[in-house]
Amino acid sequence: MQWFYVENDAQAGPVTDAEFAQLQAQGLIQERTLVYCQGMADWMPLADARSQGFWTPPETVAAPAPDAAPASTNPLAGAGLKPKLANSEGMIACPSCGARVWDNELIPMGDRFVCVNCRDVTLQKIREGVNPLGSNLRYAGFGIRWLGLFIDGIIAQIYSAILSVFFGLSIVNPVLDSMETPLLVVYMVLSIGVPLLYPVFFIGHSRFQATPGMMAVKIKAVRPDGSRITYLRSLGRELASYISLALMGIGFFMMLWDPENRTLHDRMADTRVIYR
């Protein structure tokens, strides 16, 4: 079994049963130390884990001394965080320091999430009125963003061609009048709905945060503090991009004179495009 434990207000582990017993014998894990293993509903002191049958120490393990730090002061317990086992998926980068952590280990700090190691520094910056993440952002410029858009355009053209061939239409001059109504509805949904939701899904996804074209040129869309964009905001941003396009493309060219390289739809959705 894999065990996690709290050391110096931070998660440690995983360790095996034998390693866990050794740490307990050394006094590094004590009765009031918060621990977690598969099957537990949440973190709990070692004494509770023992009483509930999760941990049966070997007879050679020395009797542990009381833990001087109360469990209630631990930020992991206060945030209700549960670690994932080592073979689980879902590791992401902390938006502040970039450290790889499990996606359920980020702590909410106002409108942002940070890992436990960044908690105190982030809190101090918030108190001082300083954006704790904004200074680390490298805004993507006009050329790199258009290159990503060009790649996405090629993907869209390939999809459109495949769709036309599948429905038996001419790619150059599709004739929709010959279609039966149900088939026409399906075609319209696939030809309009999928291209609309394509960027919404990829940009709103916590792991991608970028369309395939954006990923190819190593940029992503984020909030002003560097945190991820929700699916709802991603949808609003995509719809706003049609306004940028309707204004003869001027909405896109606004990034040329904006200090943060924002387009019109970036302004409307309050988003930024940065380098990964």
Image: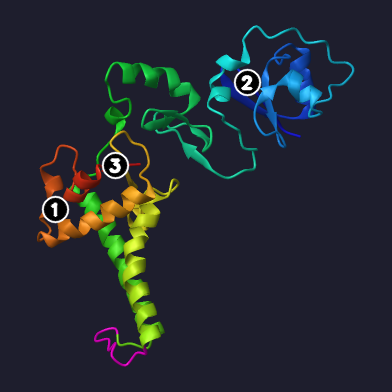
Name the kind of residue labelled 2 in the image. Val
Q: Residue 93 location, x and y as percent?
A: 45, 36
> In this image, 55 relative to 216: left or right?
right
From the image, tell me which residue sits under label 2: 6
Which residue is located at x 18 percent, y 42 percent? 261
Q: Nearer the viewer, mark 2 or mark 3?
A: 2
Q: Residue 92 location, x and y as percent?
A: 48, 39
From the image, tell me which residue sits under label 1: 251
Q: Is residue 92 above or below residue 74?
A: below
Q: Earlier in the sequence, mark 2 or mark 3?
A: 2
Q: Callout 3: helix, strand or loop?
A: strand
Q: Residue 78 location, x and y as percent?
A: 54, 23
Q: Is residue 48 above or below residue 181?
A: above
From the image, tell me which residue sits under label 3: 274
Q: Callout 2: helix, strand or loop?
A: strand
Q: Residue 236 location, x and y as percent?
A: 28, 52
Residue range corresponding to the magenta coloring: 171-180
